[in-house]
């Protein structure tokens, strides 16, 4: 069997999650069906929260005179407890832009 045939066969066969022993888990829809409304409610709440967060970021950015992407990056760094890591990245990025300058050649 050639590689193309093997790939096509893999696409047609649905694969589920693996259980603790590495075997394919039994496919059951009842737990999902029973709680589908809860999942939909959570998704809608997450979408609403995401929209509110986006509005907050835009308003705060406008108040601070910053780009919304910068405000979002700061909040994400603080929320994920990655302040030092993101600060280092920002310092390196700033240094790189300063060192290269606007006359840097585009490949």
Image: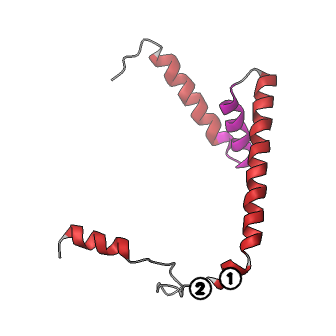
Above/below status of 90 relative to 1: above
Give how far apart the Cα atoms at labels 2 and 1 are. Answer: 7 Å
Looking at the image, is 64 positioned above or below residue 19? Answer: above
Q: Which residues are magenta?
A: 67-84
Is residue 92 shown above or below 32?
above
Q: Are marks 2 and 1 in contact (CB under 8 Å)?
A: yes
| Residue in the image at 71% along x and 48% along y | 81
* Viewer-side residue, 15 vs 98: 15
Task: Identify the image quadrant of residue 71.
Answer: top right
The percent coordinates of residue 50 (x first, y second) are: 74, 47
- Residue at the extreme top of the image, as rendered: 103
Location of residue 102 in the rendering, given as x and y in whole percent from the top left corner? 47, 13
The residue identified by callout 1 is 31
Quickly name the residue at label 2: 28
Is the stretch drawn in magenta largely helix, strand or loop? helix
Drawn side of residue 87 relative to residue 19, left or right: right
Q: Residues within 10 Å of mark 2 (few under 14, many from 20)?
A: few
Q: Is residue 78 magenta?
A: yes
Q: Viewed as shown, does residue 89 lie left or right of 37? A: left
Question: If the image is split into quadrants, where does the N terminus sit?
Answer: bottom left
Q: Residue at x 21, y 69 (%)?
A: 3
Residue shown at 78%/64% (left/top)? 41
Q: Which mark is residue 7?
A: none
Q: Is residue 89 magenta?
A: no
């Amino acid at each position: 069997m050639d590689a193309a045939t093997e790939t096509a066969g893999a696409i047609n066969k649905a694969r589920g999650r693996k259980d603790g022993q590495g075997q394919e888990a039994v496919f059951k829809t009842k737990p999902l069906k029973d709680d589908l409304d809860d999942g939909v409610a959570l998704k809608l709440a997450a979408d609403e929260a995401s929209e509110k967060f986006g509005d907050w970021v835009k308003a705060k950015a406008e108040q601070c005179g910053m780009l919304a992407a910068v405000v979002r990056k700061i909040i994400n760094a603080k929320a994920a407890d990655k302040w030092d890591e993101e600060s280092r990245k920002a310092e390196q990025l700033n240094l790189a832009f300063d060192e290269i300058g606007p006359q840097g050649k585009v490949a």
